[in-house]
Image (spheres, rainbow, N blue to C red):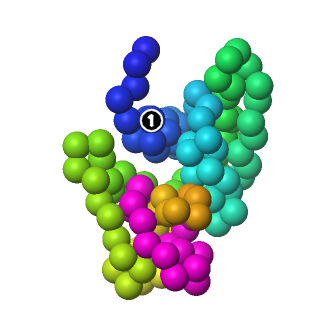
Amino acid sequence: MIVTDPIADLLTRIRNGQMARHKTVQIPGSQIKWAIARILEEHGYVESADWRAEGHQGLIEVELRYDPDGVPMIRGIQRESKPGQRVYVKKDEIPQVLNGLGIAILSTSQGVMDGDKAKAASTGGELLATVW
């Protein structure tokens, strides 16, 4: 199956997996999806993200995280820049998600990083997604 927006596919698989209370979700691998999954793991939104070499593309296996009551740690995950309408932000325009309780994920010239790292590196880029 051809996916026109692989980042939206990643976010949708995570969102749907949490709504269905799955423990893990498997996503076809790519470097940008791997970078986004690692950022989600780094910030504690998912338990773990592992790369598995299967086939020519590989798989990213994301272990979803829930609080003790079974509520997903990701309350909301939204694609910002889309293939039909790209969203670019300057270093001073990087959004603060939920007054600092969420994260913005950017693709910069220095790689994929969260909004705080992009501000520290004094660089802007394409606003891929917001997570809270």
Taking depth in this image into account, of 63 and 60 the one nearest to the observer is: 60
Q: Residue furthest front?
A: 109
31 in relation to 106, above or below: above
- The residue pinned by badge 1 equals 6
The residue located at (69%, 35%) in the rendering is 61
Question: Which quadrant: the N terminus?
Answer: top left
Q: Secondary structure at mark 1?
A: helix
Does 56 sit left or right of 18 as displayed? right
Quadrant of residue 21 in the image?
top right
Specify start and end residues of the magenta stretch as a single range. 113-132
5 in relation to 96, above or below: above
The residue located at (49%, 76%) in the rendering is 123
Q: Residues within 10 Å of mark 1 (few under 14, many from 20)?
A: some
36 in relation to 13, above or below: below
Taking depth in this image into account, of 79 and 120 the one nearest to the observer is: 120
Does 7 sit left or right of 69 as displayed? left
The residue located at (56%, 58%) in the rendering is 112
Q: Residue furthest left?
A: 84
Q: Position of residue 128 (x, y in %)?
A: 41, 56
Can residue 12 be seen here? The reply is: no
The residue located at (52%, 82%) in the rendering is 122
Amino acid under disc 1: Pro
Q: Position of residue 54 (x, y in %)?
A: 73, 19
Quadrant of residue 90 in the image?
bottom left
Q: Position of residue 7 (x, y in %)?
A: 45, 42
Taking depth in this image into account, of 41 and 111 the one nearest to the observer is: 111
Task: Indicate whether residue 116 is drawn in magenta.
Answer: yes
Q: Position of residue 102 (x, y in %)?
A: 48, 71
Tally of numbered tags: 1
Can residue 82 be seen here? The reply is: yes
Task: Indicate whether residue 98 is drawn in magenta.
Answer: no
